[in-house]
Amino acid sequence: MSHDPHRNEPVLHLENVTRVHGQGAAEVQALRGVDLKVHPGEFVAVMGPSGSGKSTLLTLAGGLDSPTDGQVLVEGVALGGLSRKRLAQVRRRSIGYVFQDYNLIPALTAAENVSLPRELDGLSTRAARREALAALSELGILELADRFPDDMSGGQQQRVAIARALIGERRLVLADEPTGALDSTTGESVLAVLRARCDAGAAAMMVTHEARHAAWADRVVFLRDGKMVDESVSQDAASLLVAAAANSKQVDE
């Protein structure tokens, strides 16, 4: 990359974050004391076995849930101190979130789904649609603009959801298995779009099980039992597979 992301303040900072679900015998510690920064221009992949806390990490980073302890800051703003209205504004304007289950609105076309966040921010319908069409074109699915979700395949819905996450000047993109419903060629093209957004100055964090997808990132964070157990600079899929295998055998201290 042409610049050092660590010269800038982080777009995302999870500061000693813990998340506990339930109480008493049913208590589950989904995250335990996680401290993580993601800087402008940086693409971070999160890996770990099922139940390690990867999706919880993303929901906290996106302001969709609150930590039990610690705090989450996006562009220096502590999400925990915001009113519901202000938090919704930050999520809409600063954070693009790609959900595993797409979360498209069935009654809206692809273009309408993608443009909705911009219209909610006060952009005119015409201007919002223009941005939506550009985002759909970037993902190679402009022909889906006037199609409804029920008339799309899972892979097509996933790419529409990614377009919605990228519209506007989102400084932070969070993606939960964004290539899960895509064939390998389409998945690689989507990762190239995310990589390009980071190279243009955005920050991204992606949960993935695929070492070859994590190889697109600048850095890979490994989670196990809610804790960060390793952090490495991404090099290639083969070395990541070795690291992932080693971490899967690691015993917590």
Image (tube, grey):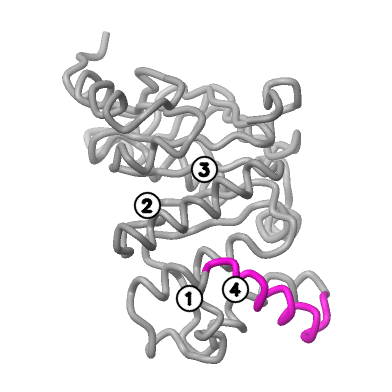
Q: Which amino acid does label 2 sit on?
A: Glu
Mark 1: which amino acid? Leu
Left/right placement of residue 238 relative to residue 202 reads left
Q: Disc 4 to disc 3, how far (Cα)?
A: 30 Å
- Residue 173, placed above or below residue 101: above
Q: Distance between the residues labelled 3 and 1?
A: 21 Å
According to the picture, the residue beneath numbered tag 3 turns out to be: 60
Report helix, strand or loop for mark 4: helix
Task: Pinpoint residue 49: horizontal percent, then vertical percent.
Answer: 24, 35
Please tell me how crowded label 1 is: few (under 14), some (14-19), or many (20+) other residues with Cα within 10 Å: many
- Sequence-earlier tag: 2 or 4: 4
Quote the CA–CA distance across marks 3 and 2. 16 Å
Q: Mark 1 points at which residue?
A: 104
The picture places residue 93, in percent across and down from the top left corner, at 73, 58
Above or below, 55 against 97 in this view is above
For the point 41% across and 42% down, which residue is it?
Answer: 56
At mark 2, the secondary structure is: loop
Q: Mark 2 points at which residue?
A: 177
Does the CB distance between marks 3 and 2 fall below 8 Å? no
> Which residue in the structure is indicated by mark 4?
137
Residues packed near mark 3 inside 10 Å, few (<14), some (14 to 19) or many (20 plus): some
Q: Residue flagged by tag 4: what amino acid is it?
A: Ser
- Residues shaded magenta: 123-139
Name the amino acid, label 3. Answer: Leu
Q: In this view, does 142 lie to the left or right of 151?
A: right
Q: Which residue lies furthest to the left in this view?
A: 249
